[in-house]
Image (cartoon, coloured by chain):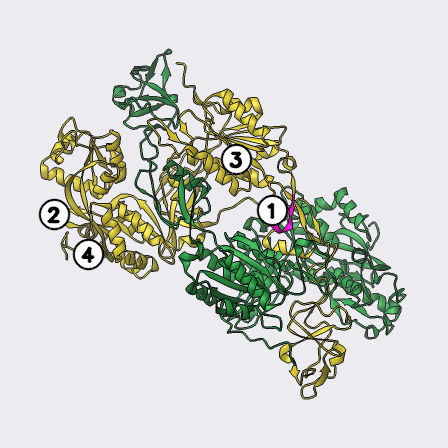
Chain colours: A green, B yellow
Amino acid sequence: MAEPKRNIYLETIPVDAAVARAKAALDRGGVAGVQTIPSQDAAGRVLAAPVFARQSSPASHCAAMDGVAVQASATYAAREGQPVVLVKGQDWWPVNTGHPLPPHLPQLDAVIMIEQVQSLDDERIAIEAAAYPWQHVRRIGEDIVATELLFPRGKLLTPYDVGALLSAGIWDVDVVGRVHMQVIPTGDEILDFTTRPTPGPGQVVESNSMVLAALGRQAGCTVERRPPVADDPAALEAAVREALAAGAQVVVVCAGSSAGSKDFTRHVFERVGELLVHGIAAMPGKPTLLAAAAQGRALLMGAPGYPVSSVVAFEEVLAPVLAWLHHEPESVRPRIEAVLTRKSPSRLGIEEFLRCSVGTVRGRHVASPLGRGAGNITTLCRAQGVVRIPRDVEGLEQGGRVEVELLVPRSVLDQTVVAVGSHDNTLDLLADALMAKDPAFALASSHVGSMGGITALAAGACHMAGAHLFDPATNDFNFPFLAKHLPHVALRVVNLAIRHQGLMVAPGNPLGIAGVADLARPDVRFVNRQRGAGTRILLDHHLITAGVDPRAVNGYGKEEHTHMAVAANVASGAADCGLGIQAAAKALGLEFVPLALERYDLLIPEDLLETPHVQAVLACLDDAAFQARIQALGGYETTLCGRTMQPGQGLGEG
Amino acid sequence: MAEPKRNIYLETIPVDAAVARAKAALDRGGVAGVQTIPSQDAAGRVLAAPVFARQSSPASHCAAMDGVAVQASATYAAREGQPVVLVKGQDWWPVNTGHPLPPHLPQLDAVIMIEQVQSLDDERIAIEAAAYPWQHVRRIGEDIVATELLFPRGKLLTPYDVGALLSAGIWDVDVVGRVHMQVIPTGDEILDFTTRPTPGPGQVVESNSMVLAALGRQAGCTVERRPPVADDPAALEAAVREALAAGAQVVVVCAGSSAGSKDFTRHVFERVGELLVHGIAAMPGKPTLLAAAAQGRALLMGAPGYPVSSVVAFEEVLAPVLAWLHHEPESVRPRIEAVLTRKSPSRLGIEEFLRCSVGTVRGRHVASPLGRGAGNITTLCRAQGVVRIPRDVEGLEQGGRVEVELLVPRSVLDQTVVAVGSHDNTLDLLADALMAKDPAFALASSHVGSMGGITALAAGACHMAGAHLFDPATNDFNFPFLAKHLPHVALRVVNLAIRHQGLMVAPGNPLGIAGVADLARPDVRFVNRQRGAGTRILLDHHLITAGVDPRAVNGYGKEEHTHMAVAANVASGAADCGLGIQAAAKALGLEFVPLALERYDLLIPEDLLETPHVQAVLACLDDAAFQARIQALGGYETTLCGRTMQPGQGLGEG
């Protein structure tokens, strides 16, 4: 066949080797260059040359206290009870902190604090203690001496340094220039976000270029995004050459860095420069390309097409090179040790970057791996941290201690409510309500189904678990499962909402699905929830009640992890129906065939009830405005919202 | 007497109480407001409202691998050795990673990786394993589902989030506005740096306003600095009112916040708004003023006049309020535990901020307190960290473990050479040369005299000590002192430079000072170095040789800690002469009466010789360009520079 070609990488090398290769190929001084800027704008910049003070500071002797300036020797006779009397304009002069001593009176060499001065009249003062020479005087050059080295080259200037520069009479400084980076999005299928498009079938809104642009600015570059280029080698080569001609020292080509039939980046880089790297031993991030151009004065990077892969390529490979070009220390994320809540296998020989939801429960940091799909940017958005699985490790064990690199300030972790369990859209409203509080709380929510939440509670890995486990035998929710799986854990069960579960079908219900009995029809393609999910248990109950054999349900084995994913299957025509909540059906314009009401509760360990985290959640539930927002979603009742549930209560008032 | 008045503060309250008072007085939502900005510019901003996805991502099913798209059921018969043959355009379609499946073919539900496809001819392929439904397919909404909550309000948007926003079809976002801050410098004695002035007698270049402006920008504010205002209450009131009228939500008045005779800020604040705080229990930083204005929509701050005090006032009081107004987490510095190298007493009831030079020696962090003068901004510039001494602690012990808040990235500490001992200008050249290396090393240098360096070596608190201790009995340098004070420490002694010591006198040598014998003259005012300094030992030797009684030397007890400080005394007329190096004399235009040559050596523990830190230093010393820079200073010989010294060598070639 003519297309596509096989994947062929130059070689897959470790991340640090890729960085080293880029550094070796670049002319460090020639890339960023030197820029002269006003000192007052220099905070955050790196000195390109040493700075020597032009003026001393203080430029003359100054008072270090409010009081009176005197000649110390005139006070030597003063003792307690034997005051010396001094006359204004003859023996003493008033001075304020920071002000120079009267410059026409060089004999003044001490300041007496105003608290130790006794005023006799408008002219005369008495003092009862001798002043020593240079007492409370800041002497010329105490801070800065003219001609001395003020700062060595390479200093990363702080706001404080701006003060020192101006005090030293340095009005301009030579600093390391900013690398200019241009980003080129590529692909026949992409839509330019600047046109505010609505994607049609087979189209994708391009966004990676702006993620990389934002990361580039964060790394100190000036950045320009070029217009998207189609999958055409000539057009791509022209765009890369134009970027270089426009002064770019770093050119990033988004997508096309692998070796598919439309991956032209490597070919173009080989024409424009010298290929350095094709393939890094990282997951995500493998199809990363590097090339040197313009006699080592420019670096070309081919970033993978998947958003998470392109972020890894930037942060692990390009960012260290940029820091080196800018003469700045590499940005290092704060690190904490945490307990990993789920086993995470990994491939030998590849360094893997595991996005995790992180929080602090009972003073212990816990990290829950999020989805690993490199195509899902939201796994990065929702992560509070990243765990590196080194190349020589096959995976990480559940319950093991891991080092987490934080994506959020460390203080945020202590203001994070960790929820693990079943997903519901009301949890999103809760997340928003928690952020509106002062102080705000973040909700870190892992969606692993109701039974997964109970497992997390058993492991002490969360502040609360969302569950809607229906027990057909008792017609009750959650309690029978807690009695069985968590008999020794004291829990408070608080209702969040009563919700409608039903069958989501296409608009107009073309197959006329009226209940679970229809799921056995051969022409009905069903989409299921994962094992352990409360919705799945509810389905099984209704299948039994209706006398339907699960094996007769076409699609029973096809599992999705959220209501919205089930709805999306139906909306896209991938399935004809699925069981879920009304909110999901409404959100995607589906019809909803009601089946049952169920209780969605929060299971909260008693010992955490008084934590600010849980108290903040409970305060939200009790808020009428919050309940009104739940009702506005449709498909929910809030009659029990915020109430403590009792065993056997079912859907009743308790 | 009419002036100055006594210090009267409203009350001196703890820093956190001052912050709480400001928050209570402000209308949080009304200050910063809400701003609508393009999503692609939103990294670093905080969402003012929740964001719900407008589009799903992927918007349609996409290939997750390079390969061929098929209908899974068409492959079910495939087994190893029993291939299924598929025809292009009928059974399979080529696809590349990230590209949508052909939208006109909804039956396609799986992708087979190109590596598992055997090409028979241009049209036909064979596969030997069944594909399962949705294999290697990213389904619609896998990342983002339309209508779902994408981000809660209050989220600090990252570059990653920019990608999610654009993918979700969100082109603009409402974010929390930036507080607009205006800074007003005040004082009759100040010069406006924008005029690039040369300070005359009694004048000071104003720089605090730009330090606070830079800190304000770092805290996310838009900042404008207003022209300086004289010490005139009416003018100051007008400036504050103009700042408010110009839309400032925070107005910072630099200096005049205390209660001296020219401190009008409090008076003005009481007229313009409602006074909240006058006096915080912090050192430096005490004379801090806060007032609310514009019905809680503006905050006025009176910053102390001392630069370090104004920084503390900003960072401890204003920065937390700004973070709260911006709905951002408070900026928290990285913290490490270190050993304090010197005792630091502190006053009860006051929280003290101790600037420290910090580095890592033998894997242990060490912190050396720098000067405590609030007027010296360079104590902040040179500090790698700050140690807080709490209000209820009277001081910190030498050798004690302290928590250090880092002012530099943690990684910088491991790239820092810690030098403690005598100061010499060649050390500044060394600092600059070390920063020019790749990787760069910072030189953290504490100036405590040669004997102080030996004490630091004994405590294991430095990588090296600079010393020039002369032993008259043996006519040798350093070794006799090491034999006495550090007999059990294996040290390498490496020469940095031979330097000229001599008497610094005013230009033209008006008193005709020709040698140490002249120091006994009653008309000659001498300025000495501190006890333990090598220069002082040298002086004492020459005094003995010349038969001069130290008690006869006018100023023998007046001590300075650096050569430059001694020179500044002579340059300003505060003294007539002092002993020091030629470089210092030359720097301030003084005359120099040569007295002796001496060896300035680096004392390096043998066990640290192979560290990259020491190796970097030794490489600098061996560099001819570095030696040429030393010679260019004047007053130095580099014949021994970089050589290992032996006992008894004196100034000879060894």
* Quadrant of the snapshot with the N terminus of chain A: bottom right
Amino acid found under the numbered disc labelled 1: Arg
What is the x, y in percent for residue B637? 19, 50
Marks 1 and 2 sit apart, C-alpha to C-alpha, by 69 Å
In front of the other: label 1 or label 2? Answer: 1
Marks 1 and 3 sit apart, C-alpha to C-alpha, by 20 Å
Instruction: Name the residue carrying label 1.
Output: B45
Marks 2 and 3 sit apart, C-alpha to C-alpha, by 64 Å
**Residue A383 in the image: above or below residue B32:** below
The magenta stretch spans which residues?
B36-40
- For the residues tagged 1 and 3, is the chain the same? yes
Instruction: Give the mark, 1 or 4, whose residue is nearer the N terminus.
Output: 1
- For the residues tagged 1 and 4, is the chain the same? yes
Instruction: Give the mark, 2 or 3, whose residue is nearer the N terminus.
Output: 3
Marks 2 and 4 sit apart, C-alpha to C-alpha, by 18 Å
Amino acid found under the numbered disc labelled 4: Met
Instruction: Name the residue carrying label 2.
Output: B473
Instruction: Give the mark, 3 or 4, whose residue is nearer the N terminus.
Output: 3
For the residue labelled by badge 1, is the local secondary structure a helix, a strand or a loop?
loop
- For the residues tagged 2 and 4, is the chain the same? yes
Q: Can you see residue B564?
A: yes
- Asked whether B37 falls inside the magenta stretch, the response is yes
The chain to which mark 3 is attached is B
Marks 1 and 4 sit apart, C-alpha to C-alpha, by 59 Å
Instruction: Give the mark, 1 or 3, whose residue is nearer the N terminus.
Output: 1
Q: Can you see residue A611?
A: no
- For the residues tagged 2 and 3, is the chain the same? yes
In front of the other: label 2 or label 3? Answer: 3
Q: Which mark is residue B645?
A: 4
